[in-house]
Image (spheres, helix red, strand yellow):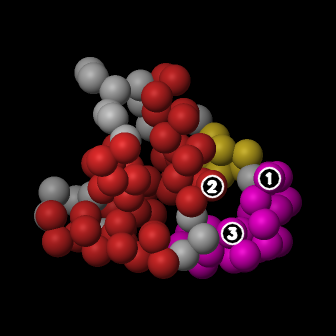
Amino acid sequence: MSKEHLLRAANDFNKGSFNKLFEAFRVKYEITGEMAGNIYLFALSYEELISIADFMDKTIYALELKGKLSILKFEEQLKVKYPGVELKQLLPVYFGDGYVQKSS
């Protein structure tokens, strides 16, 4: 993992409307201990959907139609845009000191 890519990713996501999505990732990880499954998008605002659609290289219509986002697909896109960065590594940096990783 490149620390530079990790810090750049955290900074870029903090600039967008990703907080609710990342909170859902965090809760999912704390409950299951793994980055898998889907996050449902119904509670997200239009602005948040725009940010996610932009990151995922999809249309807002495609996201709304599906109604959920695969964590695996998000992580694949994350690795394309920020080589070497994994979602479970990014979450502590994104949330700062208040986030405690689940032990393996």
- Find the distance from the CA under tag 3 to the CA under tag 2: 8 Å
Q: Which residue is mark 2?
A: 20
Q: Residues within 10 Å of mark 3 (few under 14, many from 20)?
A: some
Q: Residues within 10 Å of mark 1 (few under 14, many from 20)?
A: few
Instruction: Indicate which disc residue 31 carries.
Output: none
Can see residue 33?
A: yes
Residue visible at 41% across and 76% down?
12
CB atoms of marks 3 and 2 within 8 Å? yes
In percent of width and height, residue 28 lies at 54, 33
Secondary structure of the residue carrying tag 2 is helix
Going from N to C along the chain, the mark reached first, 1 or 3, is 1
CB atoms of marks 1 and 3 within 8 Å? no
In percent of width and height, residue 77 lies at 45, 63
Q: Which residue is mark 3?
A: 48
Secondary structure of the residue carrying tag 1 is loop
Give the main secondary structure, helix, strand or loop, of the magenta stretch.
helix
Going from N to C along the chain, the mark reached first, 3 or 2, is 2
- Image position of 41 (left or right of 86): right
Q: Quadrant of the C terminus?
A: top left
Q: Which residues are magenta?
A: 42-67
Secondary structure of the residue carrying tag 3 is helix
In percent of width and height, residue 39 lies at 65, 44
Q: Amino acid at mark 1?
A: Ala
- Find the distance from the CA under tag 2 to the CA under tag 1: 9 Å
State the residue lying farthest toward the front.
Answer: 98
Asked whether 88 or 57 is in front, the reply is: 88
